[in-house]
Amino acid sequence: MHDAQLRKPTAHELMEMHVEAMFTHDRNMRLRTINEPWPGEPPAPRFFLGRTIEGSALCRFRYDVPETLVRQLEELCADEPILRDLRTKPKHFDVYMHLLQSERFTMGPCYLVPDDFMPAAQVVSVTRENMTGLLRGGLEWLASEIDYAQPCIALVREGRAVSVCRSVRITSRAHEAGLETLDEFRGRGYAAAVVAGWAMAVRKLEGIPLYSTFWDNLSSQSVARKSGLSFYGVNFTII
């Protein structure tokens, strides 16, 4: 087991794992592409800011952002205050948007799945061997990703998967969760069960299970809250 798993990582370490899972980097730690496990390489955002509950802030920049602009943004990032509310925009939000001449941004909370979080219902692993029977009635589209988005854990009702959690960003240190629950099966605790099962599978691979979402995705935040996930920070990107 890695040393990082013998103790709980700090919020700053978790944010580092998060950004490295979300985006590929070059040797200068500049962002290159979105780190999707399946084929295709969409470009990364030009700017990433990770604010943590410890007060530290982590910033990364795409490879094509000029150095003079990087230095300006780094100074602003260093002035970000301790994060107290997941809905609060960065202190220098308006300046970031102006400097990068953009009107498009994303923001959302980031969580660690605790190692003592256990599934409250029976879950199963979905692989190419058993996916045909399980991924029907609404989740057929997951079949094209099944070889890449592993582990993939499902809760089954009436012979089909109704809630699925899988790895949608993967590094040697951490996995980010992707969660899907069919509309008619929401509100029953199924999402929490598959997140817990997925996290157990990731830890067996000696990875850290991370869960993040967008600030306006209230249902996803509700899953995190009801599951007792550990909030460690908020990510912010400018496209």
Image: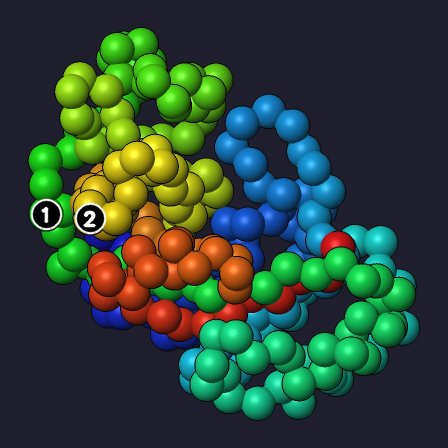
- Residue 86: x and y, percent? 48, 75
Judging from the image, what secondary structure is the residue with disc 1 in? loop
In this view, 208 is above or below 10: above
In this view, 159 is above or below 115: above
Packing grade of label 1 (10 A; few <14, some 14-19, many >=20) is few
Q: Please tell me whether mark 2 or mark 1 is closer to you in this view.
A: 2
Q: Residue at x 47, y 81 (%)?
A: 85
Judging from the image, what secondary structure is the residue with disc 2 in? loop
Residue type at the position of mark 1:
Ala
- Foreground of the two, 54 or 122: 122
Q: Residue at x 78, y 74 (%)?
A: 96
Q: Is residue 218 left or right of residue 121?
A: right
**Disc 2 to disc 1, C-alpha distance:** 8 Å
**Callouts 2 and 1 close, C-beta under 8 Å:** yes
Residue type at the position of mark 2:
Gly
- Residue 234: x and y, percent? 51, 70
Q: Quadrant of the C terminus?
A: bottom right
- Residue 105: x and y, percent? 70, 61
Q: Is residue 129 left or right of residue 82?
A: left
Q: Is residue 198 visible?
A: no
Label placed on residue 120: 1
- Residue 120: x and y, percent? 10, 47
Residue linked to disc 2: 189
Packing grade of label 2 (10 A; few <14, some 14-19, many >=20) is some
